[in-house]
Image: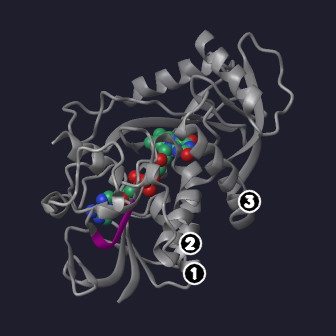
Amino acid sequence: MYDVAIIGAGINGCACAHELSKAGKRVALFDKEGIASGGSGAAGAFISPKFSKAGELKEILHTAFVYSMSFYEKEFPKLLTKSKLHHIAKDEADDVILHIYKEHTDLELLDTERQERESISINAGIVNAKPLCLAMAKSAQFIQEEVHTLEYDDGVWLINETYTTKEVILATGAYKQILPEPYIQLRGIWGHRIDIETTTTNAHSIHQFVSISPSKDGKLAIGATHNVHYHPDTSTEVYNVEEGRKELLEKASRSIKLENVKVVKDYTGLRSGSFDYMPLVGSLVLSHETLQNKNIHFQTKKPNFDEYTYYPQLTMINGSGGYGFVLAPYLAKILTENILLGKEIPKGLQPARFFARWAKKL
Ligand SMILES: Cc1cc2nc3c(=O)[nH]c(=O)nc-3n(C[C@H](O)[C@H](O)[C@H](O)COP(=O)(O)OP(=O)(O)OC[C@H]3O[C@@H](n4cnc5c(N)ncnc54)[C@H](O)[C@@H]3O)c2cc1C
């Protein structure tokens, strides 16, 4: 019997495995393909804040950015490349946003070269995506198997009619939900990034139309596209790799002149995004049972999440969009403190918020 079974070995699942193993828990980590085989294996993985004016997402990404930079530096220093990040506005509207951001941020601002557009430079980093996931998963028992069934009986979850565990964490990214609930809707946004060889040397990360990494051994990474038209499960045509490369190189060329370019590797995958762009962390509401409860008033502006019925000993971590590697250490901390110590998860992160909105509309 495991203490916790985590389903999905992307950065979210692996970060939870790392936290729980550190706390002495017996952890099983399931993945149908392998560690970092989903969106996480495709990521750049640039660690940066969100350069926007205001909002809940900006705030959580700021906190997560500060937390994850020091987390990676302390726990996985060899897998973090610290570098200056030079973020340049895309257009006039972006100039204004960046100007406001710079006036209000408490991040240390570095000197920037003068640009036509507003720009900002900060200390940031890039992690080595797959080796990081592998290192985080090291103390868990990895089981390469697709999870088809989850049954709960008498305080224990039974997985695929074979494995028993006290707790389950669903970290399945943009893939099919194992316990489909109508109020959980995640969209998978296809992304493509490339590694190139070039004679041009780039000293630091540049973010503008795409992200460009600093040069390392004559190579640099460019990423990523946001392709809302292609989805591996629903598209009838095969993904056009050449078009993706062209788009990435054209966007990169608007920020830096790259010479003698040869694409040496392509990475593609799905990011999982929620409809309010905030991640989903915490217990999953049993919608059918909760709707039966005649004492709950669903037509309210202030829903009381404590009134809902939840799947027992089961939580999820998902919806990190294009910021999975920024968010994962911070979200895994929040989730594991909830599981181990009963610490409350902020309402704006809980999947229950989607249940409340969905139930109100019924
Ligand atoms: C091209 C690209 C570039 C990106 N660049 C960055 C970046 O620079 N910085 C950044 O922070 N983020 C970046 N991201 C986003 C980041 O990769 C994602 O936010 C992150 O990978 C999400 O992690 P996850 O663990 O939620 O999902 P995933 O990594 O997709 O993991 C989910 C896993 O669950 C497994 N699974 C699903 N269902 C089952 C089942 N039933 N049984 C067993 N296993 C199952 C899948 O096989 C998969 O491995 C990028 C994404 C893409 C696609």
The answer to whether residue 132 shows anywhere in this view is: yes
- Specify the label residue 19 is tagged with: 2
Q: Marks 3/1: CA distance?
A: 20 Å
Q: Earlier in the sequence, mark 2 or mark 3?
A: 2
- Circle 1: element type: loop
Residue 2 sits in quarter: bottom left
Instruction: Give the amino acid type for the residue marked by disc 2 in the picture.
Output: Glu
Q: Which residue was labeled with disc 1? A: 23
Q: Which residue was labeled with disc 3? A: 73
Residue 295 sits in quarter: bottom left
Query: At 46% from the left edge and 47% from the top edge, which residue is drawn?
Result: 320
Q: Earlier in the sequence, mark 3 or mark 1?
A: 1
Residue 5 in the image: state x and y as whole percent. 37, 76
**In this rendering, would 260 be left or right of 180?**
right
- What secondary structure prevails in the magenta region? strand
Quadrant showing the N terminus: bottom left
Near mark 2 (Cα within 10 A), the count class, few <14, some 14-19 or many ≥20, is: some
Q: Marks 2/1: CA distance?
A: 6 Å
Query: At 29% from the left edge and 85% from the top edge, which residue is drawn?
Result: 164
Highlighted magenta segment, given as a residue range: 311-316
Q: Nearer the viewer, mark 2 or mark 3?
A: 2
Residue 185 in the image: state x and y as whole percent. 28, 45
- Circle 2: element type: helix
